[in-house]
Amino acid sequence: MMHQTPPQKTFSVAVLDWYDTHARRLPWRSLPGEHPDPYHVWLSEIMLQQTTVATVGPYFRRFLDRWPNVVEMAAAPLDDILTAWAGLGYYARARNLHKCAITVAREHNGVFPGDMAELLALPGIGPYTAAAISAIAFGQPETVVDGNIERIISRLYRISTPLPAAKKEITEYAAKLTPRHRPGDYAQALMDIGAGICLPRNPKCSVCPVSGYCKAFATDDMESYPVKAPKKIKPTRRATIFWVQRPDGQVLIRRREEKGLLGGMMEFPSTDWAEDAVETEAAIEHLLQGQTPELLRGVSVHKPVRHTFTHFHLELQPVAAQLVSADTLSIDGAIWVDPDEFDSYALPTLMIKVARAVLESSSS
């Protein structure tokens, strides 16, 4: 086949024919031609943002077992949602998930709308997620563009504009190819082609159903696309984080503010995350908030814990200490929890890493 700009109908037919044979079997996905459950589509799409398919699978199943429909999720306490979400990261998604469930239950009688405008009005749903729900769950010919589809379209047309500036251009090209027939299957087919064939490195062009239309394949420079802007150097923030243990073995944790990074999640008390590290003695004074340092004994400094967020690196210096007596330390919003019960609280991955660092070094 000659390499050319693909006619929409021919291109989509090739994509859908391939999908009917090669579609991935995923927990949230209906078989080709079946009617998908909008609740499943919404839940999976929120979970899949910034997260891999392999990671999401078990979480998706657990959420469905616990909250089989949007009305039951709406009735759940936020803390239950956050606890079940722990480990998936980007915790604002979990807070918005709960808000969206409540909105759908109250304002839409527990039924997801299929209209793009109504979907965009729901908490936590942006243009991509709205398009995905509308196309996959309701068969609307909306243009769905995730990271995999960005890669396919940028190679198909050899788009030289760097990402993220190229997103608008990529979406315009993708819209020209989106069919009115089976738009949901078509979108999922492109996702699958991107995930298994049109790979970032060593793409499997010999088995691609649309390589005959691909300009990058014709010029053998597939890996040059999509073009990406140079990465900015991430700054590093630092803080001292405390593992304070009572004589009965329980450890102090507190809830973070609802807004911001890890909002609403539980954490071990720490100093502010800042560019400059805080000396241990000053950090203890910050923790005690004017209470006498004699409250603590056996203070020990442990190996730093490093974690990377989207916009910065974080280096936490764990400091462990024993409380002299059970009820002498008062910190706003803090509770005492047995380490064996951490799974029952919304502790993010970062805090699990801190706990592991302290417990492992304490036992060695």
Image: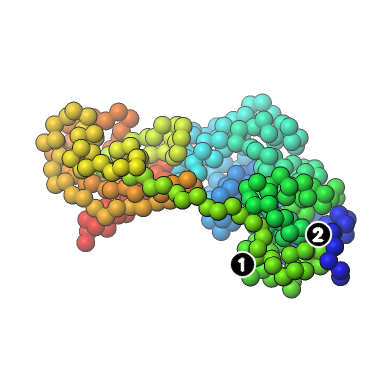
Foreground residue, 226 or 194? 226
Q: Secondary structure at mark 1?
A: loop
> Looking at this rendering, what residue extends furthest in the top direction?
107
The residue singled out by tag 1 in the image is 201
Residue 291 visible at all = yes
Q: CA distance from mark 1 to mark 2?
A: 24 Å
Please, what is the three-letter code of the amino acid marked with disc 2? Leu
Foreground residue, 278 or 136? 278
Please, what is the three-letter code of the amino acid marked with disc 1? Arg
Instruction: Report x, y in % for residue 120.
Output: 68, 34
The residue singled out by tag 2 in the image is 16
* Residue at 78% from the left image edge and 54% from the top image edge: 186
71 to 196, vertically: above or below: above
Q: Secondary structure at mark 2?
A: helix
Task: Decide which of tag 1 and tag 2 comes sooner along the chain.
Answer: 2
Res 270 quadrant in image: top left
Res 216 quadrant in image: bottom right
Which quadrant is home to the N terminus?
bottom right
